[in-house]
Structure formats: structure tokens, C-alpha cells
Image (spheres, rainbow, N blue to C red):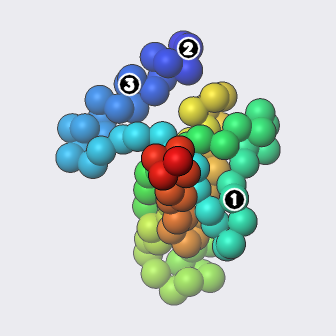
Amino acid sequence: MSNFRRYKKLKRSEQDAGKPLTPGAYMLAGKKVHCPHCEGGEFIEGSAQVNTTITSALLGVDYKKVYTLICTECGYLQWAMQPPKRMLDESLFS
């Protein structure tokens, strides 16, 4: 499946959930996020809930919300425990 088709499929599922889906650049822990696979800089943000015995043992909860960033170039999925911050598009201000 091409990246464009993968993106369109994700876009449909996010639109169904009522959340707009637009690629963008993100920061996490004060640093700009780059894809470790292709060095891409645009991502689609999402979230998931994990439910594992490790999560229960370490955090004392049955599930934990995690945040995801999917690279728009190669589809690589990154996970984070804190929400990433979307960077403003500087081209809008020039």
C-alpha cells in the first residue's frame, strides 16, 4: 500500500472519529521530532490505550493513554507517554 493510500485510509478513520487529520511538525521534550527511519519531519498525531501487565505493575493502572506520531513519508509509528506539541507552520507568517 502506498503512503498516500495509507494516509487517505487513516484520514477516513480519523474523520469518522470527529478529529481532523492534518500532517504537521511536532516537538517532544523541547526537541523537534524527526523520523528515525527516513528523517521525515511531518507526522499525523493520534493516541492509543495500552493495557499490559507491565503497565499495571509500573503505573498501578489497568490502562494508560499513550500518544502516537505516524510519519507521513514512511509510516513509521512513534510512541510517547506525554502529548507532543504541534509546531506552527512558519510559512503562514512570511
Q: Callout 3: few (<14), some (14-19), or many (20+) C-alpha neighbours within 10 Å?
A: few
From the top left corner, tell me how far across and down residue 43 is, in percent: 56, 43
Instruction: Tell me the tag on residue 9.
Output: 3
At x 46%, y 81%, the residue is 61
Using the numbered discs, state the Cα–Cα distance from disc 2 to disc 1 in whole angstroms. Answer: 26 Å
Between residue 51 and residue 25, name the one nearer to us.
25
From the top left corner, tell me how far across and down residue 82 is, in percent: 55, 72
Instruction: Tell me the tag on residue 13.
Output: none
Helix or strand or loop: what does disc 1 sit on?
A: strand
Residue 37 located left or right of residue 69:
right
Q: Which residue is mark 1?
A: 32
What kind of residue is marked 2? Answer: Ser
At x 62%, y 82%, the residue is 58
Q: Callout 2: few (<14), some (14-19), or many (20+) C-alpha neighbours within 10 Å?
A: few
At x 77%, y 33%, the residue is 38
Label whose residue precedes the other's in the sequence (1 or 3) = 3
The answer to whether the residues at label 2 and label 3 have Cβ atoms under 8 Å apart is no
From the top left corner, tell me how far across and down residue 76 is, in percent: 65, 37
Q: Nearer the viewer, mark 2 or mark 1?
A: 1
Helix or strand or loop: what does disc 3 sit on?
A: helix
Using the numbered discs, state the Cα–Cα distance from disc 1 to disc 3 in whole angstroms. Answer: 26 Å
What kind of residue is marked 1? Answer: Lys
